[in-house]
Image (cartoon, rainbow, N blue to C red):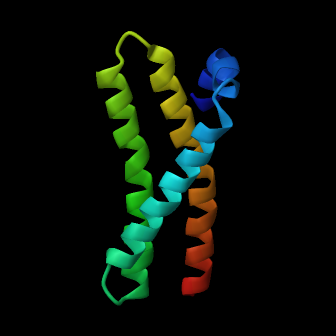
Amino acid sequence: MLVLVTYVLGDKFLAVDGVTVLLALIFYTLAFMIGYFMAGPDPKERRTLGLMTFVRGGSVSMVIAGQALPAMPEVLAIATMLTAFSLLPLISVAFLFRWTAR
């Protein structure tokens, strides 16, 4: 699915301003940090809440893009692509946390 969306709307995604991508990275980093520091003292709870708060931001942005801008489906596609591409570092961080928890 991600490959298909990238193929169809890749030019629009590449036309996104670099500031937008930077702000998305800052948002996801802050979301992880807020979740991490709001959890209890258990390190496993901190990692779990940090990762889940990180993931939730993308789905919220897709809902907002779909509801606020229904006449512009490319905005939803770009939000979907940013969310999907943000999952790549999330998966690697999750494996890193799993490795260090052993």
**In the rendered view of the protein, which quadrant contains the C terminus?**
bottom right
| Residue at the (62%, 40%) spot, across then down | 19
Q: Is residue 28 above or below residue 37?
A: above
Q: Is residue 68 above or below residue 31?
A: above
- Number of marks in picture: 0
54 and 4: which is toward the camera: 54
Quarter occupied by residue 68: top left
| Residue at the (62%, 79%) spot, across then down | 99
| Residue at the (38%, 60%) spot, across then down | 53
Quarter occupied by residue 12: top right
Q: Is residue 55 above or below residue 51?
A: above
Q: Position of residue 16 (x, y in %)?
A: 63, 28
| Residue at the (54%, 46%) spot, across then down | 24
Q: Position of residue 2 (x, y in %)?
A: 60, 31
**In the rendered view of the protein, which quadrant contains the N terminus?**
top right
93 and 70: which is toward the camera: 70
Q: Position of residue 69 (x, y in %)?
A: 36, 18
Q: Position of residue 55 (x, y in %)?
A: 43, 53
Q: Residue furthest front?
A: 19
